[in-house]
Image (cartoon, coloured by chain):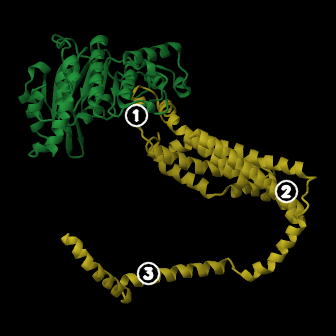
Amino acid sequence: MQTARESMKSAAEALEQLEFAQRSFTVARFKRVVIAAAIIAFYLFAGYLVQFDLGRLAAGLPKLGHWLAGAWPPTIAELPIFIWRTAETIAMAAIGSTLAVLMAFPLAVLASRNITPFPRLYYPARWFLNALRGIDSFVFALLFVAAVGLGPFAGMLGISFHTSGTAAKFFADQIESSNLGPFDAIRATGAGRTTALAFALVPDLLPLMLSTSLFWWEFNVRASTVLGVVGAGGIGQELKNSMDLLDFARLFTIIGVILIAVTAIDWLSGWLRRRLV
Amino acid sequence: MAAKKARVKMRDVRHPRAGREYRTAPRLTSEANQAPLLRVESMSKAFGQRKVVSRVSFTLAARELVALLGPSGAGKTTLFRCCTGLLEPDEGRVSFAGDASGRQRAGPRPMAIVFQDYNLVRRLTALENVLGGRLGHLASWRGILRRFKRADKLKAFECLERVGMLDHAHDRADRLSGGQQQRVAIARALAQETKIIVADEPVASLDPASAAGVLQLLRNIARSDGVAVICSLHQVGYARTFADRIIGLAAGRVVIDARTDELGDRDYDSLYASGSPLDGVTMVRPHPPQESISST
């Protein structure tokens, strides 16, 4: 009772104190102003770097509208080739992601502090994974087009190298945070390291690994539509050809096919993942 | 507050089933003069400056259940980890009946371990977990692909039957209760076909009824399979009910090594009073007060 009345009295005081603090100059308020100024400066400079200019967008909009108008009717005649190329993209993503996950598993073991057989290689392995992750599949595809020639195979290699880095880091983080009790228990029955890994860790991690692999497949289908631009196969190639020819009916037909395929795969992968976990 | 809690715990220990059924089991008398299955000689282990286990020696004989007692921090877990090869002792040696140990390589191990938190593979069935105990006897590809021989499967089913879990053979481990999981873990230890079972606080996570069942099971295994079982326990009551022999550890040293029926209340009192990190604050020690135990 006593404390309640006291706090009632001090509530008015507290408000007065707050108002006083808001009127006066404090270090905290000064700090806030500096931070706000820094953020505004950052965006201004970034806008300068990207040559931000709404006038140019306004000038370009009619052009876009004109193209959209010219996009009808869609190019039905070439639909089979578009579907074939889209299938190529999906296949690139599927095989690329699968190879990536297969490569990721041994890499993840090396990059997991708690189970690596070579603790000295832990940091090099982590650096290697960061390098794989840091280089986009697009950049890898550029390299592989130069190395193995034009076509979806180069694109698939690009996808698998980049994704394997991402996947291995994810798996390694999972392994590092998982309970090693069962692994130690199986080791203690006299099983070798590989056997114990396969017997004690893989069953618990597998559903998660499969579901994330499905996610990468889905992600790579979306990401790899552009790989065709550098000649690494798939639907991106046709997309670039249409743009170069300013054939907008063809371009929008292709975009339509991509949207349908991506939506279908998102749905399929989501359904499969829900069933796994 | 703390004393009240301890008394409630004691009442659980004096569970009627724990009191009546199990205490009447025949005591062991003449096994001590058998050749030991396990001999630990002056084992020491220090972490930095702190000596956790110092010059510990003991032996284990076939058919006996030995309880390792001691206050928290007495070195029980470290001693077990040194004995089982999970830790390298600074000094001393472990020898087994038959051959000297060739540890840390793939192949059957001389002792099986039962853990406090079971350590089953959660998404595998009870049967598959028990088959895990056969891995030391098998080519590694069989373990990796989980393809087992018919004889091994039969062995695993037999082990599950021994622990009363045959009906749950095809249940996933994470669907089982704590007591059931510990039974499966014991079946896995049985499947290793070792002569020594080391159980590190096997009942610390279990309710009193399951705990008594698990300890009874361990003792039956010791009796009928000629296995030596050593088992660290927190509750003196369980140790007195189920163990043939007590090894008391305090501050890393063996202070008691005697048959259970030779020990009186005063011995247990001194064990928990000496060298405990809770010295001087014995009122809040995590173990039940002695006067309650004497009435069981």
Tell me the subunit letter for badge 1: A
- Quadrant of the image occupied by residue B116: top left
The quarter of the displayed image where residue B33 is located: top left
Label 3: element kind:
helix
Q: Which residue is mark 2?
A: A238
Q: Amino acid at mark 3?
A: Arg
Residue A254: image location, x then y, percent: 83, 57
- Answer yes or no: is residue A93 visible: yes
* Along the line of sight, the residue nearer the viewer: B258 or B286: B286
Label 1: few (<14), some (14–19) or many (≥20) C-alpha neighbours in 10 Å: some
Residue B227 numbered tag? none
Dividing the picture into quarters, in which one does residue B274 lie? top left
Q: Find numbered disc 2 in the image and state the secondary structure of the residue it sits on.
A: helix
Residue A184 circle label: 1
Give whichever of discs 2 and 1 has the lower sequence position: 1
Determine crowd level at label 3: few under 14, some 14-19, many 20+ residues with C-alpha closer than 10 A: few
The answer for how far apart the CA atoms under marks 2 and 3 are is: 51 Å
Marks 2 and 1, how far apart at CA: 54 Å
Q: Earlier in the sequence, mark 3 or mark 1?
A: 3
Question: Residue A51 in the image: x percent, y percent?
Answer: 69, 80
Which chain is rendered yellow in the image? A
User: Label 3 belongs to which residue?
Assistant: A32
Q: Amino acid at mark 1?
A: Asp
**Residue at the location (90% across, 67% down)?**
A70
Q: Closer to the camera, B105 or B7?
A: B7
Give chain B's shade.
green
The structure residue drawn at horizontal position 91% and vertical position 54%, both measured from the top left corner, is A76
Q: Residue furthest bottom?
A: A24
Dividing the image into 4 quarters, which one contains the N terminus of chain A? bottom left
Q: Position of residue A44 (x, y in %)?
A: 60, 82
Chain of the residue that carries numbered disc 2 in the rendered image:
A
